[in-house]
Image (cartoon, grey):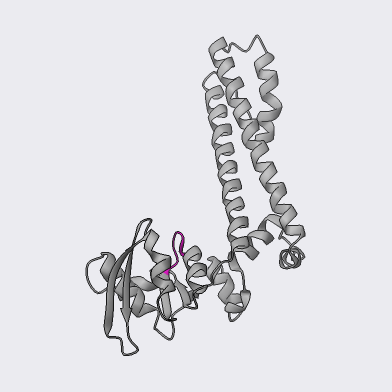
């Protein structure tokens, strides 16, 4: 899978290669709409969930796999044809682990989470930059966004701290940008909380101690159908949570 060119590799029930073909993005839907229903394997990467839903509408059985599970089946140097053949072989393995296909609602709320995370990261970077610039002039602000919001107005109004006019104007600009980033993050957080209130599964997760609306909604949108996991240990391992080492 790619942005514009897709490599197709098809085999019969005996594993004999019947099809090797490149398709442009504009040709994908028409090609699979005219194809008899079959098993389609894809790596879980950019736009894979979109194509999984799209091809599933044509009657095909679509399964997504993590790229790390497909890599061992690449027989030669990495290129599109070898990757497509590896995906084709991997999807037929009986012990292969598949990635649940996300619906449109899941992807939408995850997009909001990612956008909010980007604003929070940019807000932290902006605050650190302002704190670093002030420290060069002997003005030290404690860590934390609230400390900056509280101290900056007083610092700008203090005529005896020795800050030049050029720096004061710069700090005003940076502070305005910081407030805008903070506002954007809060608005997206409110949007996530509204979605959380309308989602039953997310509300059930919030009942667990230590889990709030942000974490609960992220888990629901990421996992989708938890029935794909045999037990809680598998789910935690899928998230990357492992037991603490005491040895």
State the image quarter where residue 24 is shown: bottom left
Q: Position of residue 7 (x, y in %)?
A: 31, 67
What is the span of residues highlighted in magenta in the rendered image?
A: 43-48
Residue at x-position 40% and y-position 79%: 91
State the image quarter where residue 42 is shown: bottom left
Q: Position of residue 151 (x, y in %)?
A: 68, 25
As drawn, 235 above or below 120: below
Toward the viewer: 242 or 20?
20
As drawn, 28 above or below 97: above
Query: Number of labelled discs?
Result: 0
Say whether residue 67 is left or right of residue 75: right
Can residue 8 be spotted in the picture?
yes
Residue at x-position 58% and y-position 73%: 235
Residue 178 falls inside the magenta stretch: no
Q: Residue furthest left?
A: 76
Q: Position of residue 11 (x, y in %)?
A: 31, 82
Decide whether the magenta segment is chiefly helix, strand or loop: loop
Toward the viewer: 1 or 196?
1
Residue at x-position 41% and y-position 67%: 30
Residue at x-position 62% and y-position 73%: 225
Quarter of the picture holding the N terminus: bottom left
Q: Residue furthest bottom?
A: 14
As drawn, 26 above or below 231: above
Q: Position of residue 101 (x, y in %)?
A: 54, 70
As drawn, 134 above or below 54: above
Toward the viewer: 23 or 33?
33
Say whether residue 62 is left or right of residue 78: right
State the image quarter where residue 239 is shown: bottom right
């Amino acid at each position: 899978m790619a942005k514009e060119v897709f490599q197709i590799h098809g085999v019969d029930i005996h594993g004999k290669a019947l099809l090797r073909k490149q398709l442009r993005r504009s040709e994908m839907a028409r090609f699979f709409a005219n194809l008899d229903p079959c098993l389609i394997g894809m790596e879980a990467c950019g736009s894979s969930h979109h194509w999984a839903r799209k091809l599933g509408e044509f009657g095909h059985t679509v399964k997504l796999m993590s790229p790390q599970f497909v890599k061992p089946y690449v027989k030669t140097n990495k290129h599109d044809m070898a990757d497509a053949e590896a995906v084709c072989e991997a999807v037929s393995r009986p012990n292969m682990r598949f990635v649940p296909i996300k619906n449109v609602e899941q992807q939408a709320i995850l997009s909001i989470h990612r956008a909010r995370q980007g604003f929070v990261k940019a807000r932290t970077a902006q605050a650190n930059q302002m704190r670093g610039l002030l420290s060069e002039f002997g003005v030290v602000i404690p860590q934390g966004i609230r400390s900056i919001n509280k101290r900056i107005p007083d610092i700008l109004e203090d005529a005896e701290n020795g800050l030049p006019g050029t720096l004061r104007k710069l700090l005003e600009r940076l502070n305005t940008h910081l407030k805008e980033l903070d506002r954007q993050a809060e608005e997206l957080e409110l949007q996530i909380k509204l979605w959380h209130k309308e989602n039953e599964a997310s509300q059930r997760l919030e009942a667990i101690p230590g889990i709030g609306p942000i974490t609960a909604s992220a888990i629901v949108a990421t996992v989708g159908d938890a029935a794909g996991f045999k037990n809680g240990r598998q789910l935690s391992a899928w998230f990357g949570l492992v037991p603490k080492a005491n040895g």
